[in-house]
Image (cartoon, rainbow, N blue to C red):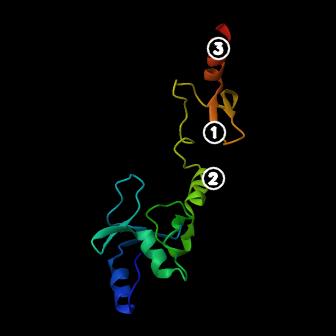
């Protein structure tokens, strides 16, 4: 966990943040190094390792920072480190937020593994886990099962 030891350290860390302000969304977009995960989180080199710019901002500006919680984005803009756009939550809350905002990798898929399109007419939503199932594939499996 990063903890500023004094005001001088706070000013030094603040100066290291490269900022481009987006006046439409009010995001503070980090323009330095980005994560290699493809998500584009701003990364700051501190104490011999990279730390997320959003985590650094939360550490510096949140009145209470809990290192065991994740730092999540309200704005869904991963390079953003505006403290007003950040909040802390558990990993489960992070996953629920991801699904609710339509960013879960399974929700982004438009076709089943066999190539059938997920349309409202061809998709069954499992009420237990909200998972999708292709109805064409389900019919094919049932037909094969019934022939045995």
Within-10-Å neighbours for mark 2: few <14, some 14–19, many 20+: few
Residue furthest out toward the front: 148
Tell which tag, 1 or 3, sits nearer the viewer: 3
Could you tell which of marks 3 and 2 lies nearer the N-terminus? 2
Residue furthest out toward the right: 127
Give the Cα separation between the discs numbered 2 and 1. 13 Å
Question: Does 32 sit left or right of 119 as displayed?
Answer: left
Q: Establish if 108 lies above or below 23.
A: above
Give the Cα separation between the discs numbered 3 and 2. 36 Å
Quarter residue 30 falls in = bottom left
Q: Nearer the viewer, residue 143 or 73?
A: 143
Quarter residue 119 falls in = top right
x%, y% of residue 51?
37, 68
Label placed on residue 131 = 1
In contact (CB < 8 Å): disc 2 and disc 1: no
Q: Nearer the viewer, residue 92 or 86?
A: 92
In contact (CB < 8 Å): disc 1 and disc 3: no
């Amino acid at each position: 966990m990063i903890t500023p030891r004094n005001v001088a350290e706070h000013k030094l860390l603040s100066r290291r943040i490269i900022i481009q302000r987006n006046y439409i969304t009010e995001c503070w977009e980090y323009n330095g190094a980005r994560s290699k995960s493809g998500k584009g989180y701003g990364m700051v080199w501190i104490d011999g390792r990279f730390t997320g710019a959003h985590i650094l901002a939360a550490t510096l500006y949140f009145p209470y920072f809990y290192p065991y919680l994740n730092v999540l984005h309200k704005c869904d803009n991963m390079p953003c480190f505006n403290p007003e756009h950040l909040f802390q939550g558990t990993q489960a809350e992070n996953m629920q937020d991801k699904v609710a905002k339509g960013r879960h990798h399974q929700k982004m898929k438009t076709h089943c593994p066999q190539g059938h399109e997920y349309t409202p007419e061809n998709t069954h939503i499992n009420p237990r886990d909200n998972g999708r199932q292709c109805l064409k594939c389900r019919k094919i499996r049932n037909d094969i099962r019934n022939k045995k």
